[in-house]
Amino acid sequence: MTKRAYKYRFYPTPEQEQLLARTFGCVRFVYNSVLRYRTDAFSERKEKVGYTAANAHLSKMKKAEETAFLSEVSSVPLQQCLRHQQTAFNNFFEGRAKYPVFKSKRHRQSAEFTRAAFKYQESQLFMAKSKVPLAIRWSRALPSGPSTLTVSKDAAGRYFVSCLCEFIAESLPITPRMIGIDLGLKDLFVTSDGHRTGNPRHTAKYATQLTKAQRVLSKKKLGSGNRAKARKRVARVHAKISDCRMDSLHKLSRRLINDNQVICVESLKVKNMVRNPRLAKSISDAGWGEFVRQLEYKAEWAGRQVARIDQWYPSSKRCSGCGHVVGVLPLSVRAWDCPACAVRHDRDINAAINIKAAGLAVLALGENVSGMGPVPVSCSR
């Protein structure tokens, strides 16, 4: 048994919309107030405020007259936001993330409900303090009753509910196919058998529409209702781009998982790569990190394997035939001749073949392959 989140869109009634607006506002207020309290306590008194002290501060806020409105919504989302804040601080102190930042009302809003704050009955979901079930567009049935609900509203004004459920992952039949993929920009990835996927370039596809919406937004008066409407139009275009990108990545990753037993990929440092001002927009639009993440968790569910090779492995510079490594190979060079064996290589296909060989070596030897060391040529055949 493992846990999986199922996300659906729903359409709240006017009463539910008001309740959600109050809930989102209270969650945001509590998160920001407690974050300010913890920050001031450390900067002024060098005192670290943990989850227990933050929870006590929330209890005081509820009893105070000026913040009595916190009792109008369910207490569970307020409690959960403190747990998420504690997780954010743990990640910060352990060096995995930056210092937590304040939440804005103009970005995505969310509230998490545990089983004590919702009811699931006959494919109907009831939130706390609401007697009307959520009008959810059920695209597929839940495998079990949800243990946690996360209700969210994106910047485009759409409402979603994410149900965390337990399900039994079914392994796919074992197949002898093994493949290596080279991630890129001209093609999202190229496989070791020569298949090219192309790159849909979703941001460029909607660039004109996005530019017009942003130009209209820039001319609206700050704080006006028309500016809020124009901001929502811009958010809708961004949401369209994001939805198209996620749909494409899910389809491609599912196809690779279904067809191959082993998938070999590079360990790319995308955060460092987007510092290149010329390629940052294209790299972000490609979604390499999300694509590899999808491959990994889908492979785990399906009984497949994803092998990552070292980021410094010279997959493009190495000849997949004889193993010779060239010194310099600019990005503009898409095909090159090996000076040792005189074989002409397509840059991307050659890299994918080397990635497959290195990935299989990782699985066989149980250790990473990095640097300029030799890789058995037989593994790439």
Image (cartoon, helix red, strand yellow):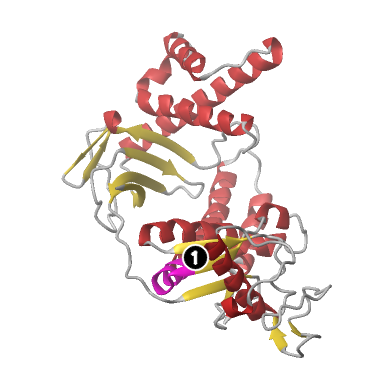
> Start and end of the magenta stretch?
252-262
Where residue 85 appears, x then y in whole percent?
A: 52, 29
Relative to 362, say whether 322 is above or below: below
Residue 254 magenta-drawn?
A: yes
Relative to 113, say whether 339 is above or below: below
Residue 191 visible to the viewer = no
Judging depth in this view, the residue of 31 and 374 nearest the camera is 374
Q: Dot 1: what SS?
A: helix
Residue positioned 63% across, 29% down in the render: 93
Count how many numbered circles sit on residues in the image. 1
The residue carrying mark 1 is 249
Residue type of the residue flagged with mark 1: Leu
Where residue 297 appears, x then y in whole percent?
A: 44, 56
Residue positioned 33% across, 45% down in the render: 163
For mark 1, does the 10 Å Cα neighbourhood hold few (<14), some (14 to 19), or many (20 or more) residues? many
Where residue 247 appears, x then y in whole percent?
A: 46, 64
Residue positioned 42% across, 59% down in the render: 298
Judging depth in this view, the residue of 154 and 296 nearest the camera is 296
Name the image quarter holding residue 202.
bottom right
